Amino acid sequence: KVGDYFHLKVSDTGCGMEPTEVQALFARFARLEKHRDVEGTGLGLYLVKAIVVAHGGKIDVTSKVGHGTTFDITFPIKPPVNERGELFSVTFA
C-alpha cells in the first residue's frame, strides 16, 4: 500500500519482449509469435487489463529482451463506484 493506492509488481526472468510486442500485449486474442505453440486464447492479459481499469487502476509493462518482464499494477484503495456501490463498468470492447 502506498498512500491511497495498492501497488502490485509481478516480474519474471524470462526471455523478455521487444517494445513492439509489449504494445500489443493487451489486445484481445493477442499472441506473441514466439509463443504460438503455447496453448491459450490470447485473452488473459486483455481480461486482466479490463478488470484493473474497471477498478480505477492502471497496468504498466516494462520488458528487456533477455532479461524478463515486469507488470506494475496500481489499484486505488477505494475503487470508483456508483450510488449503489457497484463498479462503474467493465468494458470488453
Image (spheres, rainbow, N blue to C red):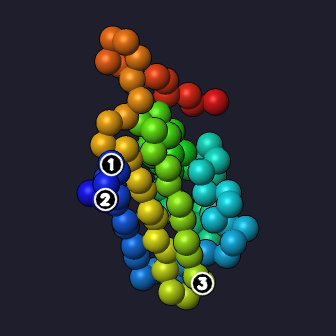
Which residue occupies the foreground of this view, 31 or 55?
Answer: 55
> Which residue lies most toward the top here?
84
Identified at 60% across, 84% down, the residue is 65
Which residue occupies the foreground of this view, 87 or 40?
Answer: 87
Quarter occupied by residue 16: bottom right
Which residue carries the number 3 mark? 65
Identified at 67% across, 75% down, the residue is 18
Identified at 42% across, 82% down, the residue is 13
Pointer 3 or 2: first along the chain:
2
Element at label 1: loop
Pointer 1 or 3: first along the chain:
1
Which residue carries the number 2 mark? 2
Q: Residues within 10 Å of mark 2 (few under 14, many from 20)?
A: few
Residue type at mark 3 is Val
Residue type at mark 1 is Asp
Measure the C-alpha gap from mark 2 to mark 1: 6 Å
Measure the C-alpha gap from mark 1 to mark 3: 33 Å
Which residue carries the number 1 mark? 4
Identified at 56% across, 75% down, the residue is 63
26 up-or-down from 8: above or below: above
